[in-house]
Amino acid sequence: MAEVTIIIAFLAGVVSFLSPCILPLIPAFLSYLTGISSNEIKSSPKEARTKVFLNALFFVLGFSVIFSLAGILLGSVLAGISYQIRIWFSRIGGIVIILFGLYLLKLINIPILEREHKIKVKKFKYSYLTSFIFGSTFAIGWTPCVGAILGSILTLAIVNPSNAFSLLFSYSLGLGIPFLIVGFFISQASDWIRRHQTGLKYFSYIAGVILVILGILVFTNKLGLISNFAYTLKIFESFQGI
């Protein structure tokens, strides 16, 4: 079951990245961090692309460190709780994840997710340091875009404290790898984002449905059904290959 939840956390990071109020802003955000305009990227692509990619890397390192530390902390604090308490954590956590899913489906309103908890960070002389600190504050001050999805992964980490670090690190990878790809191919990525911006809004609804299903499985302590389903698919594929 641990492998399944880790995959879920990774995919949650990817979905967070594809949020319609995050992805379209990333090229402009990277341009702000590096101080490089789109014209400069076109005029000296190799040098500019290297600088943008390195700043993206330090931004990703910033939020990855915070998420990983949160995972270690949750695992340490909650590792010794009893089975009965864990069952109640699962029930409460399942309800919380379902509510996050309903929020993404726009069926309910959660005011705390509508507010941005931003920490102002001033730009430093070294852009890589600025990017790292921006990444750290991004992890601490959720935006409404990733609040529901990140909140669900944090809830899943509380319910499964032994996997807390793996879950949050996997979430970081899911969010960070696409970010690095955009940083490396920033010109092409900007064009792709402009072409697909309209379709990105449907990702929130897909994520909402997935969170509701995930919340039900967590609440009923049936999360293992996902791994059983994956195992059944493998058996079916092996029979097809005979």
Image: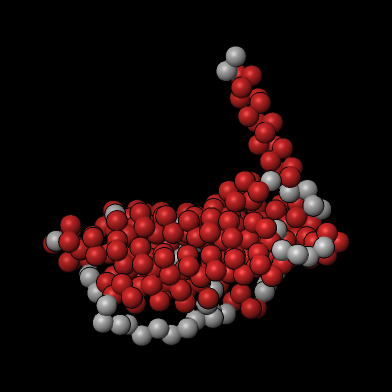
* Residue 190 seen in this snapshot: no
* Residue 83 seen in this snapshot: yes
Q: Is residue 4 left or right of residue 219?
A: left
Q: Is residue 71 left or right of residue 97?
A: left
Residue sitting farthest toward the right: 84
Q: Is residue 185 left or right of residue 205?
A: left
Seen from the viewer's position, the closer of residues 192 and 178 is 178
Count of numbered circles on the image: 0
Find residue 163 and report its horizontal and vertical position in percent: 64, 56
Q: Is residue 44 above or below residue 4?
A: below
Q: Residue at x 70, y 43 (%)?
A: 226
Residue sitting farthest toward the left: 43
Quarter of the rendering containing residue 149? bottom right
Find residue 221 and report its horizontal and vertical position in percent: 79, 52
Seen from the viewer's position, the closer of residues 219 and 71 is 71
Q: How is the image coloured?
A: secondary structure
Q: Residue at x 66, y 67 (%)?
A: 76
Seen from the viewer's position, the closer of residues 169 and 45 is 169
Seen from the viewer's position, the closer of residues 83 and 98 is 83
Q: Is residue 168 left or right of residue 176?
A: right
Q: Quadrant of the C terminus?
A: top right
Residue sitting farthest toward the top: 242
Q: Is residue 127 above or below residue 232?
A: below
Q: Residue at x 17, y 61 (%)?
A: 47
Find residue 233 and report its horizontal and vertical position in percent: 65, 31
Find residue 216 and report its horizontal and vertical position in percent: 76, 54
Quarter of the rendering containing residue 77? bottom right
Q: Residue at x 29, y 56 (%)?
A: 184
